[in-house]
Image: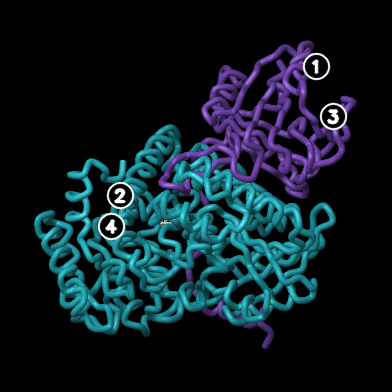
Amino acid sequence: MSATFLGMPGNFPENAAIAVQDSQLRFNLRKATHTIRDRRASVVGELPDWQELRAAGKAIKDHTLRNLDRYLLRMEEAVTRAGGTVHWARDAAEANRIVTDLVKATGETEVVKVKSMATQEIGLNEALAEHGIAAYETDLAELIVQLGDDFPSHILVPAIHRNRSEIREIFLDRMPEVSRDLTDDPPALTEAARLHLRERFLRSKVAISGANFMVAETGTLVVLESEGNGRMCLSLPETLISVVGIEKLLPSWRDLEVFLQLLPRSSTGERMNPYTSMWTGAVEGQEFHLVLLDNGRTDVLADEVGRQALRCIRCSACLNVCPVYERAGGHAYGSVYPGPIGAILTPQLRGMGSELDASLPFASSLCGACYDVCPVAIDIPEVLVDLRAKAPHAAAERAGMKAAGWILNDHERLAKAQRAATKLRKLVPKRRLPGPLSAWTDTRDVPEIPEESFRDWWEREASHGQGAE
Amino acid sequence: MSAREEILARIRTAVAGAQDVEIPRGYRTERQVDDLVGLFAERVDDYRAIVHVVPSAGVPAKIDECVRGRRMVIPEGFGRDGGWDDLRTADGVLTNCAVAIAETGTIVLDHGPGQGTRAQTLVPDYHLCVVRADQIVPGVPEAVARLDPSRPLTWISGPSATSDIELNRVEGVHGPRTLEVVIST
Ligand code: SF4
C-alpha cells in the first residue's frame, strides 16, 4: 500500500465496486464521525480539569520538541541500558533498509504487524515484500483494508468505507479456512478474523509495531489499542521491531499521567481504551529494536508556525468534527494522514511539490472546530493559512478554497454539484474534477465521483426501504 | 555523517533560537473519591466486564465458583494449586494485579508474582482478576506514580473489543473475551 501511497499520484484500483463503495463511504463517515464525536464530548465533559490537561499536554510536547536532541539521546541511552538496540533513520528508505535487514537476520519470511501510521508512511510492507518478506496486518480494520487491496480512510476506523457485506465478501475470498456459511453479522466476521489470525500470532517469530509514546527518562514504549492484537504482537514473538517517529517522545514517566487521559478520551471517546502495553527494552527474553524515524519531521520542526503539527498524538478528534472530511472522506487527502491534521502535516512532511500536496492546505473552510477539540491545542487553521501563503499554485487553490465554502454552505448546491460531477465523471481527463471542485476532490480519488451521487443513492435506497440502517 | 549525527544536527538547527516553555501542571494529580470500591466496580461494569465485591474471607470460595469447570492457568505466586499448564488449551487465567484505577475502571498488571507472563494473561479466552481494595487508586496520575516503569505493564479496561465493522461494538477479538473482576474488601 504505501510507499506508493504517500509518494505516487493516483493509482487507486479502479473497479466496478467503486461507486457503491463511495456512497457507502459518505454514509458511514457521517455515522462514524457523529457517533464518536458525541462519545468524546461526553467523556471529556466528565473531567473538570480537561483544559488544564490540554494545556499541560501542549506544553509537554512543545518542551520536548524544543529539546528533542537531548531527549532522544536520553531515550537511546535508557533503551540500550535495558537491553534494546536503537537505530536512527533519516528517511523512509533508510528505515525500510534497517527493518528489512533486521528481519532477514532472523531468517524469517513472515512478520506480524500492529497498526502503525509510521510504517504506512514509509511504505514498509512494500519494501519488505520486495525482499520476499510478507507483512501481515493484524488490526481488524487493517486486515480488511489489506485483504481488500485498498487504503485506510480514517485514522481510527480505517475500514470505515466498507460495509458488512463487503467485508464478508473479502473474507470469503481471502481466508481459505473460512466457511461459506459465514454471515455478515459483525460478531461472526470478528470471530472469523480472530481464528484467521490466532495461529499466525502463535507461530510468528517477528513483530513490527509503532508506538503512541516513548518516555525518554525510562526508555519505555507505550502502545494503546482495543483488540488485543497489539498485545499479541508485542509479547509473543521472539523479536520485536518498533518504528517510531522522533516526535513521539515524552520527557518523563510522569508525563504519561497527562497523555493517558487525553488520548483515549479524545480518540475512541472511552475513559480508557481496552489495552495499553508498556515495555522497557528487552522484556521476557525478547529481542527489541527501536528505529527512530525522521523522514521529514526535522523539516517540520524548522518551521516556526508549522512545527506545532508535531505535537499531534493521532487521536483523530479533528477528523470527526471536520465538515470537509465528513464529505470528502479520508482517501481524498491522498496520504496516511487524513483530515485536518493531514492537511497540515502531509504538505510539510512531503513538501508542496505535487499538486495534491499543494492543494491540501485549501481543504478546509477554516471553521476552527479542529482546534477546539485538539487535545494538544494545535491551531490547525493558523497553520493552514500559513501554508496557503507558501503554496505554489496560489490562484488556482484560492478558487478551490472558495469552492469548499460554497459547497458546504448550501445543501441544495452540494446536491447539484455532486450530480453535476457525477455526470461529468466520464469526461474528466486524468480523473480530475474540473474547476472549483478540484481543490479538495482532485486528489486521485475517483471514488469521490460516484456514478450516482450519494443523495440520489440515498433517496433511491430509502425509497426501497433498505437504505443502510 | 551517521544518521544519528545528522538527525541531531538537523534538530539543533531547526530549534535554534526557539523559546523553551514551562509545563503548567494545573490538572488534578490527586482526587478525592469517597467510595473507591464502588466507583471502580461501576466503571468496570460499564465495559461489560463482570464484577463481584467480596469480603476477603470469601474470596477463595468466590474464585472456586468462577473457575468451576474451567481449565485455569494459575501463575506462580498466586498461592493456589491445581493450575492448567498448557496455554493453548487453557480456558482461562487467574491473576492478581499491581494497581487498579477507579475513575477509568482499569486494572494494571506488572506481571510480578501472581500476575503471570504477558502471554499467560492474553492467550486464554477468560481472565479472572482479583483486586484488593487497597490497590485501587482514584485516578490515572495516582496509578502512574505507583507503577514501576522497568516492569512490563499491561493496562486492561474491559474485555478486548472492536468497532471496526460499521461501528458496531463487538467484544472479544484477540484478547480474553470475558473479563471477570473480584474486588476483595
Ligand atoms: S491534530 Fe490534534 S485533534 Fe487532530 S489527530 Fe492530532 S492530536 Fe488529534
Q: Nearer the viewer, residue A430 or A254?
A: A430
The chain painted cyan is A
Disc sitting over residue B60 in the figure: 1
Q: Earlier in the sequence, mark 4 or mark 2?
A: 4
Q: Amino acid at mark 1?
A: Pro
Name the quadrant containing residue A325. bottom left
Which of the four quarters of the rendered structure image does ligand 1 lie in? Answer: bottom left
Say above or below: A87 vs B167: below
Q: Amino acid at mark 4?
A: Ser
Q: Residue at x 28, y 57 (%)?
A: A23
Residue A37 drawn at (x, y percent): 36, 44
> SS at mark 4?
helix
Say above or below: A9 vs A250: below
> SS at mark 3?
loop
Can residue A377 be seen at all in this image of the molecule?
no
How many residues crowd around disc 4 within 10 Å: few (fewer than 14), some, or many (20 or more)?
many
Q: Residue at x 42, y 69 (%)?
A: A345
* Residue placed furthest toward the front: A180
Disc sitting over residue A23 in the figure: 4
The reply to whether dot 3 and dot 1 touch (C-beta < 8 Å) is: no
